[in-house]
Amino acid sequence: MEKIKVGIIGTGNISGIYLQNGSKFDAMEVVACADLDVERAKAKGEEHGIKGCSVEELLADPDIQMVINLTIPQAHASVCLRALEAGKHVYVEKPFAVTREEGLEVLELARKKGLYAGSAPDTFLGGGIQTSIKLIEDGWIGTPIGATAFMVGGGHESWHPAPEFYYQHGGGPMFDMGPYYLTALVAMLGPITRVTGSARISYPERTITSQPKYGQKVKVEVPTHIAGVMDFASGAIGTLLTSFDAKGGSQLPRIEVYGSQGTLQVPDPNNFGGPIYLSRAGQREWSEIPLAYGYAENARGVGAADMAKAILTGRMPRVSGELAYHVLEAMHGFHDASDQGVHYMMKSSCERPAPLPLGLQPFCLD
């Protein structure tokens, strides 16, 4: 079977799992990796048996049809634009871009060039969220009425070796973890029409207590505690809490979906698998539901593989740029609503991603 030849730009920590999984899929083959640090790219390439090179060399390679962009968020849009200008499809790590303007620029160039632009997170293609979607579609909880989602923790400065980014523009709990939760909610309930919320910076300065930067101070530039409400086009109402300010942690569930006939506890959308629990109207006990789909382990790269299969078959990718931009706009919308004291009306929409078919073979996508 034909495979799309893929090049990876950005050989930081996240690149390892993409290189490990990438060429296992039936629709793509990772053939090169590049980085601003060319020696690091060459070392990573040698480790995985592929070419390591400069970004310029990778973009100039006529055999490479798609780029996986694993650069830092501030470079996401600029690298995507360069790849599209070079005539290559592009799949980027989350978030799709830092600003709405950058996101729209990427979408518009992709349309102009007749190319695909897609984005992580792809965890919603894992067994946990896909089984949850199947249960909702098959009516196990009746008509969805609402949902809650919680990502609550104490921040990164106590354990991350370089936590500064998480408190700078483009970071914060909403932009770091919000894409996982919002993408999962849209995959289950469809697009969002309106958001509102409140946001604050609880601690204007953070002190790093992890190595190697122990004792350094970090100025906080973005909200670190955001409580949001969203209206879905379907009529469901959702709430979302993202926080780096809960120093004592949290025991809240990750996501719950409430329906006219029951409640579904959905696994952590930062992972691909995890337990699912269902309680139907009239029941007092929760039942654990077995996963009906694969990709329950760390399957990062499945989104890029889905886009590669879409390129080969002409269908729309499930990890579309339209979905990623819709999530990006919603994240900014929560901040805007808090700053301005208003409801933010969403300007974008998107198709709910098509569920995966049952019975797929490992590393195969429809």
Image (cartoon, helix red, strand yellow):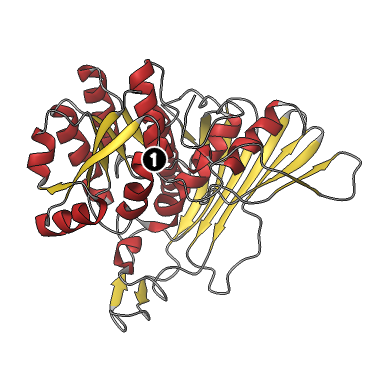
Give the image location of residue 51, x and y in percent: 16, 46
**Please, which residue is most extreme toward the bottom here?**
215
Residue 331 shown left or right of residue 256 in the figure: left
Give the image location of residue 292, x and y in percent: 66, 37
Whether residue 320 is visible to the viewer of this picture, yes or no, is no
Give the image location of residue 225, x and y in percent: 49, 60
Disc 1 on helix, strand or loop?
helix
Residue 83 shown left or right of residue 147 in the figure: left
The amino acid at mark 1 is Lys
Q: Is residue 87 above or below residue 336?
A: above
Label total for image: 1
Give the image location of residue 303, x and y in percent: 41, 36
Residue positioned 22% across, 28% down in the render:
65
Q: Is residue 169 above or below residue 230?
A: below
Asked which quadrant contains residue 107, the reply is top left
Q: 82 or 338: nearer the eye?
A: 82
Q: Residues within 10 Å of mark 1 (few under 14, many from 20)?
A: some
Residue positioned 35% across, 56% down in the render:
171
Q: 55 or 32: nearer the eye?
A: 32
Asked which quadrant contains residue 348, the reply is top left
Quarter placement of the N terminus: top left
| Residue position marked by numbered label 1 in the rendering | 24
Q: 337 or 130: nearer the eye?
A: 130
Whether residue 199 is visible to the viewer of this picture, yes or no, is yes
Residue positioned 33% across, 22% down in the render:
311
